[in-house]
Image (tube, rainbow, N blue to C red):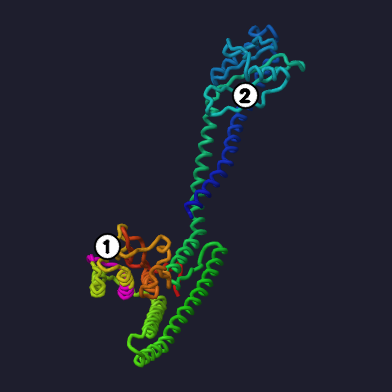
Amino acid sequence: MRTRLLPLLIVLMAGVLLALGFPLAASLAASEQQRVVVDRLDDAARFAALAQFVGEGSFGTDERGATLSGELASYHDVYGIRTGIFYRDNRAMAAAPEDWAVPYEGEGRRAFHEALLGRRSHDPPQVWPWQPGARLTIASPVVRDGDVVAVVVTDSPTGQLRSRILRGWLLIFAGESAAMLLAVGAAFRLTGWVLRPVRVLDAVTHDIATGRMNSRVAATGGPPELRRLAHSFNEMADHVEEALEQQRAFVADASHQLRNPLAALLLRIELLALELPEGNEEIASVRTEGKRLARVLDDLLDLALAEHAAAELRLTDVGALTAERVASWRPVAEDKGVVLEGECGAVTAWADPVALSSALDAVIDNALKFTPAGEEVTVAVAVVPDGKTVAVVVADRGPGLTEEELGRVGDRFWRAGRHQNVKGSGLGLSIARVLLTAGGGGVAFAPNEPHGLRVTVTVPRHAPAEPRGQGFTER
């Protein structure tokens, strides 16, 4: 979830910083240019004050004209700014360089006409750093006796202005980059703080789903809403565990209490059979159903005990244990005319030996039960390619199951409709699944081509992780 939430927060924060950065950059550029404009206006006003006292046609012939000419030349030499004073008819009163004339078009012409109306240039177009040939033109009127008699025009290069703007932008970029890094770090911490209880809740939910019903969420961090959710989850888990415990107790008690009356009933049936002719079909049918009911009760009791008992995991030689179970079931296979083969190398894993043995018995018994005479059942032990689990694969050559039936195999009391005449209670694979899940293992079902069923029993290769003390608690 963090991989989805964190990019969203980063995009939002980047948008906010950009929304602040662009106006700030534009404001800095405008401020730098305004400072230059003010300087040029001051210089133009000084030249206009000198030009007021220079009469038309007398430039260069009196001391004031010579002074103005010298000022313009010095100004151009020092700053590289072209400056001219032009009469209304575009004739030059003075200019530096001397051959410079008032522009006939563009921003210079606009500023010249504006000054003829008695207004200074206050808002020339903004100069940007990516405009290497841009120049800044400022015009100021020369007023004599209330009339505009000439215009002072300055045409400035913008290299230094663009450099200052660019440096300011780099500082803004550096500041926003630092702010973005801080924001990303804060977002990372924030998402971790918010999502940590969610991850813990997900882990505990998985534990409960896989049979660890005593797992609980330790609501020690995160927003108040998630802490309340964790508290509610723990209450729900308590109720579910209590209901399941009552169900297990009922099944175990009912199975146990029914065994004695059933045993007495079977005994009476046997006594009654002695009084009837040998081979009576009704008695045989009653005897068969009674024994089937006894098996169901035994399986129910085994299932209740399997769900209630905790797994005692230890490092186990799965290969040796599987070979032992194969050897135990081989006489049964021979009686049925089925070939039972085992490929059981030395592979160790963490498992409860008793639970794993019971699960393998249930799976092998199921394979032999549905495999016709003359066919083969193979049992192979191998390490799964990911290296995390050990698999015991039991493959038979029976009729197999359809896709729909594969989705239901392992459910309690479920049996395929075409296999109802085969002995069994429909609880064997359910018991195997419960026994394996309690130890962190599992069981999976798949077709065995060209026909048959492939059952894969898995147990973890590595020791189970310690309970996450800050993530959940176990009672």
Going by the numbered disc 1, the residue's amino acid type is: Ala
Instruction: State yes or no: residue 358 in magenta.
Output: yes
Q: Residue furthest right?
A: 146
Q: Say if residue 328 shows up in the picture.
A: no
Helix, strand or loop at mark 2: helix
Label ID, residue 382 = 1
Crowd class of label 2 (few under 14; some 14 to 19; many from 20; radius 10 Å): many
Going by the numbered disc 2, the residue's amino acid type is: Arg
Q: Say if residue 79 shows up in the picture.
A: yes
Drawn side of residue 100 relative to residue 456, left or right: right
Residue at image point 34% right, 64% down: 399
Residue nearest the viewer, comparing 43 with 295: 295
Picture coordinates of residue 191, whole percent (x, y): 50, 55
Q: Residue 287 falls in which quadrant of the image? A: bottom left
Query: Is there a contact, CB below 8 Å, between mark 1 and mark 2?
Result: no
Helix, strand or loop at mark 1: strand
Q: Residue 465 falls in which quadrant of the image? A: bottom left
How many marks overall? 2
Q: CA distance from mark 1 to mark 2?
A: 88 Å
Drawn side of residue 401 relative to residue 157, left or right: left
Picture coordinates of residue 96, whole percent (x, y): 58, 14
Which region is colored magenta?
Answer: 342-361
Q: Which residue is mark 2?
A: 40
**First of labels 1, 2 by sequence position:** 2
Name above or below for residue 308 compared with residue 233: below
Residue nearest the viewer, comparing 302 with 341: 341
Point out the image quarter for the C terminus.
Answer: bottom left
Instruction: State yes or no: residue 393 in magenta.
Output: no
Name above or below for residue 312 compared with residue 44: below
Crowd class of label 1 (few under 14; some 14 to 19; many from 20; radius 10 Å): some
Drawn side of residue 279 relative to residue 118, left or right: left
Q: Residue 471 falls in which quadrant of the image? A: bottom left
